[in-house]
Amino acid sequence: MVLVLFGDTHELHREVDVPAGDVLICVGDFTMFSKNLAAIEDFNEWLGELPHRHKIVVPGNHEFFLEANPERRSLLDNANLLIDESIEIEGLTIYGSPMTPLCGAAFGMSSAKDRQLHWSKVPVSTHVLVTHGPPFGILDLSPDQAERMGDPELRNRVRELPSLRLHAFGHVHGAHGSVEQDGVTYANVALMGHLGDLVQAPTALRMRSRRTDISERLL
């Protein structure tokens, strides 16, 4: 099964060349501080034009309209919207959460104690974790930043998930890439660079759905 991962397109999604795959996963920030419906509708329409059998969207800190709108699921009816919940696809348990430590941002939570409680709810059966922001210390430093932007509480929870094989995230522009630690592949799939242009392509990974290990990076 091929997973195609991307995020941080900030309303430039129609400029992205999306590779073929089975599961398309957006890690958030597909709008630009969007507080209106138009950007959400255009992104949803674009998703509907793509051929992937399964589509998953986790919002980011720019998706204010989704955070405020109780009917948000109907706004993205061409994908499965994951907000602190799981979905199972062909034997893979995928959990998505938009929460970041940013105060004043959409889905923000600044209190470390609150974040610890929040992340404790990620099921131990999770194979693929999709969050908007990175864990602390892993692909969370952009060339134009002096401090890491990752979440220490998220990092601590990730280390407690015995079945985890992939953690995909974005949020930090300019930190695109992937690393493997202790059997887990961490992938920052933000397409926008730190200067505000789309400079990366989506990441495609082949996963064995039964053994749930990553066998090959395609892109």
Image: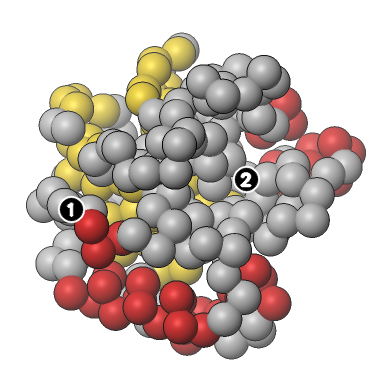
Closer to viewer: mark 2 or mark 1: 1
Horizontal side of residue 89 vs 128, given as left or right = left
x 65%, y 82%: residue: 69
* Residue 7 in the image, given as x and y percentages of width and height: 40, 49
Picture coordinates of residue 122 (x, y %)?
A: 62, 45
10 Å crowding of disc 1: few (<14), some (14-19), many (20+):
some
**Residue 43, quarter of picture:** bottom left
Q: Please name the amino acid that badge 1 sits on.
A: Val
Instruction: Let me know if residue 54 appears in the view.
Output: no
| Count of marks overlaid on the render | 2
Give the secondary structure at mark 2. Answer: loop
Residue 20 appearing in the image: yes
Mark 2: give few (<14), some (14-19) or many (20+) Cα within 10 Å.
many
Q: From what the image shows, is residue 51 above or below residue 214?
A: below
Residue at figure coordinates x 22%, y 54% from the top left: 16
Name the image quarter holding the N terminus.
top left
Vertically, is 170 above or below 30?
above
Q: Going by the image, does 139 lie left or right of 202?
A: right
Specify the quadrant that holds the C terminus: top left
The disc label shown at residue 18, or none: 1
Mark 1: secondary structure: loop
x then y, percent, for residue 137? 61, 18
Q: Is residue 137 above or below residue 189?
A: above
**Earlier sequence position, callout 2 versus callout 1:** 1
- Which of the numbered marks, if any, corresponds to residue 122? 2
Q: Nearer the viewer, residue 143 or 216?
A: 143
Tell me the number on the disc at residue 33: none
Label 2 and label 1: CA atoms lie apart by 29 Å
Q: Which quadrant of the structure image shows residue 207? A: top left
Q: Amino acid at mark 2?
A: Val
